[in-house]
Amino acid sequence: MSKEQNLLILNCRKGNQRAQLKIYNLFCEAMFFIACRYLKNDEEAKEAMQDAFLKKLHLERSIQKI
């Protein structure tokens, strides 16, 4: 992982929405194609990909509160 990606992840953990959007834009296409392989349906794959990002971001926020 590059230094820029590591910095983006650190900023995501701090709740920086710009960093979260950049991470999403970096990985959404790859995640979509992986989800398509498993689900065989574009709409379900999009939903699964978005759910995964939202769960991850929510988990990061929950950990910060502890």
Image (cartoon, rainbow, N blue to C red):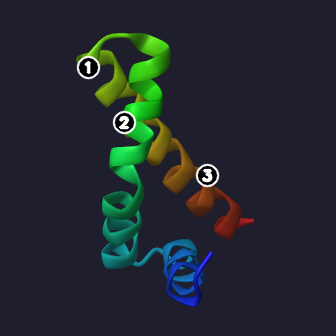
Of callouts 3 and 2, the N-terminal one: 2
- Callout 3, which amino acid? Leu
CA separation, marks 1 and 2?
8 Å
- Residue 34 percent coordinates (x, y): 47, 31
Q: Quadrant of the C terminus?
A: bottom right
Left or right of 55, for residue 51 = left
SS state under label 2: helix
CA separation, marks 3 and 2?
20 Å
Neighbour tally class for label 2: few under 14, some 14-19, many 20 plus, Cα within 10 Å: some
Q: Reply above or below: 64 against 28.
A: below
State if disc 1 and disc 3 touch (CB < 8 Å). no
- Nearest the camera: 66 or 44? 44
In the image, which disc is placed on residue 59? 3
- Callout 1, which amino acid? Asp
Neighbour tally class for label 1: few under 14, some 14-19, many 20 plus, Cα within 10 Å: some
Q: Which residue is drawn at 50% across and 73% down?
A: 12
Residue that extends furthest to the left in the rendered view of this protein: 43
Q: Which residue is drawn at 52% across and 42% down?
A: 55
Check disc 1 and report the residue beneath it. 42
